[in-house]
Amino acid sequence: MKYIYGVDLGGTTVKMGLFDQEGNMLEKWEIVTRKENNGELILPDIAKAIADKNEEKSIDKSDIIGIGMGVPGPITEDGRVLKCANLGWGIFSVADELRKLTGVEKIKVGNDANVAALGEQWRGGGRGFDSIVMVTLGTGVGGGIILNGKILTGSNGAAGEIGHLLVNPHEKRTCGCGKKGCLEQYSSATGITRMSKEKLEQTDTPSELRQYDHPITGLELFKAYKNNDALAKEIVDTFSSYLGKGLSHVAAVVDPQAFVIGGGVSKNGQIVLDVVQEKYEQDVMFALKGKEFRLAELGNDAGMYGAVRMVLS
Amino acid sequence: MKYIYGVDLGGTTVKMGLFDQEGNMLEKWEIVTRKENNGELILPDIAKAIADKNEEKSIDKSDIIGIGMGVPGPITEDGRVLKCANLGWGIFSVADELRKLTGVEKIKVGNDANVAALGEQWRGGGRGFDSIVMVTLGTGVGGGIILNGKILTGSNGAAGEIGHLLVNPHEKRTCGCGKKGCLEQYSSATGITRMSKEKLEQTDTPSELRQYDHPITGLELFKAYKNNDALAKEIVDTFSSYLGKGLSHVAAVVDPQAFVIGGGVSKNGQIVLDVVQEKYEQDVMFALKGKEFRLAELGNDAGMYGAVRMVLS
């Protein structure tokens, strides 16, 4: 039997998965991401976790096909990280370093959002499609683009940065990226909370959202929306209008077969696809109408699956 | 010596080029595009033109490496046209048909805008870059995207349709595509003429543009702009704002190395790049700043060069 390690490196924990040569997950576990000293312990920790697992399972190094890893920052196609403030990393070849530390020849490294998109295309909500755009609606809006089964990296590793599409030129609030009117300011969990707070404060419209004494979540918003709550409808309309517009831009550029929507906000299910798809169809030219919209299926495992896929393809 | 034919099929004429195996153009000529009977004469005419040239030059069929062709409609990666209203064509494999008619095995077919982009990347303004976005500012706004030296086709051949990016949600006029607020409504030769007419009619601002008794062209607009004409500045500002915004969307999706600007409006030269680049830099997130902006160089020959490049790669 041959093995592949799929690693999803995050700012808090490293998700580690052991897979067989068919891409089936055999087991998964986590280690802490130790960020001290500019993140110099991170790769040695990952190498040690792999070595320990090899010993535990009596896996010979010659039976390891390769190691794939997603990293939270821009990565070039040959595995160089261009900067990863989140981990304290500067510019270096993550692939070369992990190769030295593990003695495994085949190392594939990608941006974490892109790698998760590849996982969803291979084994998740994008199954059956070669070309998808994955959109992650979490704290921010992340994106990953898969064309003909391969990650679209971009010349500086910044392809698929759809959370920072400028969708509202009239916005006065500043986005985390320093610009104003980014998609992420409306169509993320943070955007939902912020828009809800403002609507509740600035209007007298009766709403079931007024019962909560904490910041409104996507779950509460979509629950109210399903109950025909007028205020919730306005907020969902803003959320979905900007997201539909953003996806219409993406479609006009890469013409994918399907959109796969993931992240915390997508846990509200089909209703999220429905509201976004309706706005998308309004905004997009005829040649791009009728795309498939799917929910992501792999949750936090998507990155590990995508990492393995990079090794296998 | 080995030869390649590069063909650029347009709605009025077919541009034909004979190239050597290094991709140097040996000669070029044109034939008429006969569109009667649903365009059934077009491919036989092209095949005959090639046969005649072979005879004239005593080129043996075994010395032809292949034939590349750009077609004005959506084309899949395997050379099927999905519809080409302009030529009267329905859905069929252009590549298979031309293979039968010419007896040449290697036939490559692509969308004309995409093929022209490939030509510019290979031998024109995009030389030295692997990944470019070509923007053609003519009657409409066309686009072609080259990633790692290959055309980005899209799942329905509609990738790079950047003329129909929705850039102005407040627009009331309808675009040729049926939507409102498309980039093409502002940043094309047609857009310049229309915006100029409206500004001249709706304001009393003194302007050198008032001297002309015909629709204003890009040439006249940019001439006035260079003379600090206030009205021209307003129009150029609208033209470049929407184009800069559109290109910022494209960059966030595919992260190219460079933009190459062609078409009639680009004949005004460096000033066009300057005004667009300024707006682009305002709109785009930090990771995407600093892209190169270049003028297209091959003019009407770009499609033939790109067609040859498809055969050689």
Image (cartoon, coloured by chain):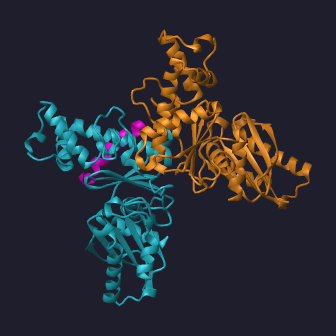
Chain colours: A orange, B cyan
Specify whether residue B101 is painted magenta: no
**Vertical order, B183 against A20 (above or below):** above
- Residue B230: x and y in percent read 18, 34
For the point 54% across and 50% down, the residue is: A257
Front in this rendered view, residue A210 or A313: A210
Front in this rendered view, residue A293 or A187: A293
Q: Is residue B220 visible?
A: yes
**Vertical order, B308 against B286 (above or below):** below
Tell me which corner region of the image, top left, top right, bottom left or bottom right, holds residue B122. Answer: bottom left
Specify whether residue B276 is painted magenta: yes
**Total residue callouts:** 0
Front in this rendered view, residue A16 or B274: A16
Residue lying furthest top in this view?
A: A204
- Residue A188: x and y in percent read 57, 30
Q: Main secondary structure of the magenta part?
A: helix
Residue lying furthest front in this view?
A: B37
Tell me which segment is drawn in magenta: B265-285
Tell me which corner region of the image, top left, top right, bottom left or bottom right, holds residue A89. Answer: top right
- Residue A238: x and y in percent read 48, 27
Front in this rendered view, residue A193 or B10: B10
- Residue A217: x and y in percent read 62, 22
For the point 48% across and 79% down, the residue is: B105
